[in-house]
Image (spheres, rainbow, N blue to C red):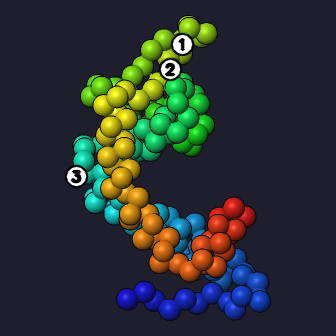
Amino acid sequence: MPRPRKLPAPDTQVHSQTLALEDFLTFRLGALSNALQTQVTRHYIAPASPVGLTEWRLMGQIQRHGELHASALSRLSLMDKAQISRALQPLIDRGWVLRRADPQHARRHLLQLSEAGQALFDEVLSRARPYQAALLNALTADERAMLDRILDKL
């Protein structure tokens, strides 16, 4: 059972000197993010493939933006290039991501999903959409709009 919240009333200021670690917004959002990511990985990604959440996110960025290079992928995913490289290699080895030399830049490669990678991505996405819809439908329309505003503001 969650412990009762001790944050001040909405019309008062939060004081940093008395803010407990478990009340840090970053701590709470991180915990929520981890819990949601675990559910997505366990129920939608793992049954379809050996791809982990990091690889799934990279595939999602490539699918969304089309052919791109690792630097762009790094900016879009907020991951450093070493993380990108480690996560991409198994995707390339399995034939889900194709890598080719960039004709405009000799030291750079362009990445895109293969047909098999696109099919895998589509399968996992079709499994994940109902879960994502259920999460959003647990909130009222006003709560969803407020959540959007809060996330945009932060």
What's the amino acid at mark 1? Asp
Label placed on residue 110:
2
Q: Would residue 52 be seen by someone viewing this image from the given angle? A: no
Residue 105: x and y, percent?
Answer: 59, 10
Quarter of the picture holding the N terminus = bottom left
- Position of residue 154 in the picture relative to residue 45 (left or right): right
Check whether the beta carbons of the residues at disc 1 and disc 2 lie within 8 A of each other.
Answer: yes
What's the amino acid at mark 3? Pro
> Circle 1: is it few (<14), some (14-19), or many (20+) Cα within 10 Å?
some
Please give the residue where the numbered disc 1 appears in the rendered image: 102
When asked about the image quadrant of residue 50, the answer is top left
Residue under the image location 65 percent in, 72 percent down:
145
Which tag, 3 or 1, sits closer to the chain's start?
3
Residue under the image location 38 percent in, 50 percent down:
125
Which tag, 3 or 2, sits closer to the chain's start?
3
When asked about the image quadrant of residue 58, the answer is top left
SS assignment at label 1 = strand
SS assignment at label 2 = strand
Residue under the image location 22 percent in, 52 percent down:
47
Q: Nearer the viewer, residue 117 or 99?
A: 117
Label 1, label 2: how far apart the Cα atoms are: 6 Å
Please give the residue where the numbered disc 3 appears in the rendered image: 47
Check whether the beta carbons of the residues at disc 3 and disc 2 lie within 8 A of each other.
Answer: no
